[in-house]
Image (cartoon, coloured by chain):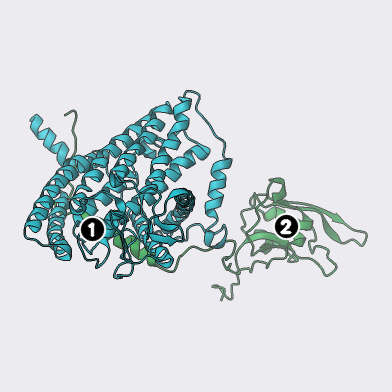
Amino acid sequence: MPGDVRFVERPEAESSYVRAISQGLGITVRHFLRPDKPTQQYPDEKWELAPRWRGTHRMAVHEDGRAKCVGCGLCPTVCPVNCIKLIPAEDENGERYAAVYEIDEFRCIFCGFCQEVCPVEAIHLGVHYENAEYTRERWVYDLARLCENDHPVTALWDPADPSSE
Amino acid sequence: MEAISGTAFVVATIVKTLVFFVILLLGVALTTYMERKVAGFMQDRSGPNRVGPLGILQVMADGLKFILKEEVTPEAAHKRFFLLAPVLALFPATVLFGVIPLGSPLPTPWGRVDMIVADVPIGFLYVLGIASLAVYGVVMAGWSSNSKYSFLGGLRGSAQMISYEIGLAMSLVPVLMLAGNVEMPVLVSMQQSFAAGPGTYGVWFIFPLLLSGFFFLVSGLAETNRVPFDLPEAEAEIVGGYHTEYSSMKFGMFFLGEYFHLITTGALISVFFLGGWDIPFWRGDNIRVLADGTVIGDPAWWKTLLTMGAFTVKTTLLVVFFMFIRWTIPRFRYDQLMDLGWKVFLPALMLYIMLTAVAVFVLDRAQIVGPAFAGALFGLNLLLMLIFLYLLDRGRLVRGATAKTRAATATEGD
């Protein structure tokens, strides 16, 4: 026999095909008769998300429908992956607003810094996750889409209530 | 009541053929669904449940998918045989169903209709003959694909099926000894519960021929190429097996063939060992048709329906049992498979046949008949079963590769 063949000792006298089969059948039958399945019927049943779940962004709006964003530029600055594009502008009353505000949800890592840094509580992360799209372009959310989103906003961590209870 | 004859016979046979075939096709479709459901439940999943109520329409979706998929025929394939193979895989299991008695005779205004498509006098010899043809589908598919993987799968399949046909046929020899007849309806009438009179035993053959039933069950599993005997298919070694090159509905036919085989094997076991359409613990369905045409017992349409139901239940339970086996037991290695067939089953069956013959002879001489005869044989079978399982247990007969290799090395003197 070529080379060194190492024989693995198998407990042949102790292991038994017949008994192993019976035991195996016992296990499968027990599972077969188990009424509760851990499977979650996903589109019908959904996870209850935590209030601090960080998902799809939404922009808070004034009562007249304008975005609350004042174009201060803090969120693109703080964003670690550079996924926010903001071009600020000023209207005739001297109020600043975002002329262009886009978030690339593909690049976003959902750290939530933009929400934390926003001085007017305009941009928020949302308790929401189902955002599949057919094209990559659709993943770049413009201001109108961000304003349209109406899912609950992510709760920020509260130092007074560290475990969020 | 007279058996149906003339034009009415032809009409009845055509109707029976159509009805039974449709029932069988529906059964096969539902079996594929059931397999996925059973597998799911055993693995704590829910199985298909999106298409239709409880996912029952999954069957239609699967069928539609098979038909709509692109059909690819390999350039180098032997076209004629490549086309023929799926047909041959499907055909034996289908025609086998024709000789299986499905229920008690149905009385009609035109005469008695036996619930069997073809009551062939050669009975289960026909079954064995046709079952042997199943191997052609496998070997032809493997060869005509002109692919080495398919070919290896085909070879494995044919070797396995031929080996276990011996077990299948030999495990029916004790049945023949007890019945003295190969006709399927006669086999059923002999097993009817509490039936008295000459040529009856009053119990299902599983009791007096327990070991025979066990061998038939295992050989039947091997014949259907299902786990733990699914060596013809092996993703890891030979890509897919004999149907690697098949696509679309041609693959679907192999797939359906497996389930046809499954149902037919279940039905055969019910007929040979579980009393066929007999309803246990009930004398009302003890309807026998003697060779000269006289009918014992009184047939009725509702009895026909009940007995067909009983037969369906038995077959379904066996099919579910096969599924449990499939999703529980890991497969054999190929040499173990061959060892089990040739070195364990063949000698064990020969010995068993001899012992049964002696027992039948002795019991006949002692003039023990009917249930007492069956009881005595049952005792003998229990004993033999225990001895067989004891020997099979703990690696006494089927051994691991380690022991074998070590033995071989020792003889080489190294």
Q: Position of residue B12 (x, y in %)?
A: 46, 52
The quarter of the rendered structure image containing the N terminus of chain B is bottom left
Q: Quadrant of residue A65?
A: bottom right
B107 or A121: nearer the viewer: B107
Q: Chain of mark 1?
A: B
| Chain of the residue that carries numbered disc 2 in the rendered image | A
Residue at disc 1, secondary structure: loop
Question: Picture coordinates of residue B75 (x, y %)?
Answer: 50, 24
Locate residue B238, reporting x and y percent: 37, 34
**Secondary-structure class at tag 2:** helix
Question: Mark 1 Cα within 10 Å, few/some/many (few <14, many 20+)?
Answer: many
Q: Report whether A63 appears left or right of B277.
A: right
What residue is rendered at 31% in x and 70% in y? B282
* Residue type, label 2: Leu
Q: Residue furthest top?
A: B76
- Relative to A80, does residue B53 appear above or below in the rendering? below
Q: Which residue is mark 2?
A: A74
- Left or right of B339: which side holds B54? right
Q: Nearer the viewer, mark 1 or mark 2?
A: 1
The colour applied to the residues of chain B in this rendering is cyan
Colour in which chain A is drawn: green
Q: Amino acid at mark 1?
A: Phe
Q: Is residue B354 above or below residue A21?
A: above
On the image, the x and y values in percent for residue B266 come to 34, 53
Residue beneath disc 1: B205
